[in-house]
Image: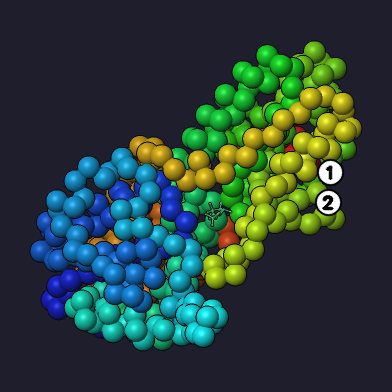
Amino acid sequence: MPSRMTIKRIGILTGGGDAPGINAVIRAAVKVAIRDYGLSVIGFEDGFGGLVEGRCRELTLQNVVGILPRGGTILGTTNRDNPFHYPVTQNGQTVFMDVSEKALQNLSQQKVDALIVIGGDGSLKIAYEFYNRYQFPVVGVPKTIDNDLSATDQTFGFDTAVATATDAIDKLHTTAESHHRIMVLEVMGRYAGWIALYAGVAGGADVILIPEIEFSISKVCDKLRERYEQGKKFSIVVVAEGAKPKGGELVVRRVVKESFEQIRLGGIGDFVAQKIEQALNIETRVTILGHLQRGGSPTAFDRILSTRLGGAAVNIVMDGRFGEMVCLRTPHIASVPLIEAVGQMRRVPLGCDLVRVARQMGISFGD
Ligand code: F6P
């Protein structure tokens, strides 16, 4: 493994779905690497795809000017292109092959001494595989709006997604009130209910449905009916894309075979709205917030978290602590072995204070 003395050049790539704050991570890493350690930095384009195909470019201080408030990633990303299971066209057909050695060759050709991977569980698993199989020096930075990585208190991008969803709930409130309607808002989050719970509470939703608590439509309707009987002629229901009815199935929008995570959830909002309208005969509308949650300028919180993580990733490289992921252990930035970081999903604990207080305040979780 290289040491502080031998590291001259680091690589950076961003993999998986984008999240507000990635550019802030890149900026911090580039600045710390160049200004403080005198390193050079190379960015691989479009995640592991760029690494396999040798698509890369030098990242200078000039390249990161003005990117702190910008959403997305200047390097591009993809949630496909796993080098250990890479789509290759042979005789007009797509087959999957292990092309990881090609990626390794490109790293050596570009004289990369260590690689920083900014990604969610899919990309970090691949990063771990490079470290484990080839002992290539990698350091991970956790990224996802879903906030579902167990080894960090919070992922960057989550706070911005919650702010976007909260803003949507505020807007839905005014139109719901004017029209005396029920508004159902479907938010992202995969198999965890963090975005729904946080935005739901921050936006004053009446019902919050999360994957961690199976719901019953009759309980949801009981809550909505109670509000009508109290003279409240509108209601807001926030439903996480991974929520499901008791004994029911997840609603899948599409299957993406080449992706790290093949299933894309979506559509539970329509199901819930239709059932409510049938049961209560009150006009109900659905909004699916979708990828708006992944876009836009990061909040101040996310900019700071991203900056701390990006800088720390370079510090960890220079300390020779490879195969680790930087993480938030409030109030500190720490690191954990990548293998631990990718092992377990972080879901909403049912006994957490926010769920408890929400229930005490009368918010229904449909159970
Ligand atoms: O993991 C982030 C996320 O936005 C999830 O909340 C969502 O289920 C998924 O990615 C959507 O993926 P895609 O961008 O491939 O549609």
Tell whether label 2 touches label 1 (CB within 8 Å).
yes
Secondary structure beneath disc 2? loop
Quadrant in which ligand 1 is drawn: bottom right
Query: Can the viewer see residue 151?
Result: no
Q: Is residue 250 left or right of residue 88?
A: right
Q: Is residue 74 left or right of residue 212?
A: left
Give the x, y percent position of residue 157: 44, 47
Structural crowding at the residue carrying mark 2, measured as other residues with C-alpha within 10 Å and reported as few (<14), some (14–19) or many (≥20): few
Give the x, y percent position of residue 304: 32, 44
Q: How is the image coloured?
A: rainbow
263 and 211: which is toward the camera: 263
130 and 276: which is toward the camera: 276
Give the x, y percent position of residue 168: 56, 30
- The amino acid type, in three-letter code, at marker 1 is Ser
Give the x, y percent position of residue 202: 57, 31
For disc 2, the marked residue is 246
Location of the N terminus (image quadrant): bottom left
162 and 149: which is toward the camera: 162
Image point (34%, 84%), residue name: 102
217 and 333: which is toward the camera: 217
Secondary structure beneath disc 1? loop
Image point (20%, 76%), residue name: 110
User: Residue 136, relative to residue 157: is it above or below?
Assistant: below
Q: Is residue 218 left or right of residue 161?
A: right
- The amino acid type, in three-letter code, at marker 2 is Lys
Structural crowding at the residue carrying mark 1, measured as other residues with C-alpha within 10 Å and reported as few (<14), some (14–19) or many (≥20): some
Q: How far is the residue under mark 1 from the one under mark 2?
A: 6 Å
* Label of residue 216 in the image: 1
Image point (41%, 84%), residue name: 99
Q: Indicate which disc, 1 or 2, sits on the residue closer to the N terminus.
A: 1
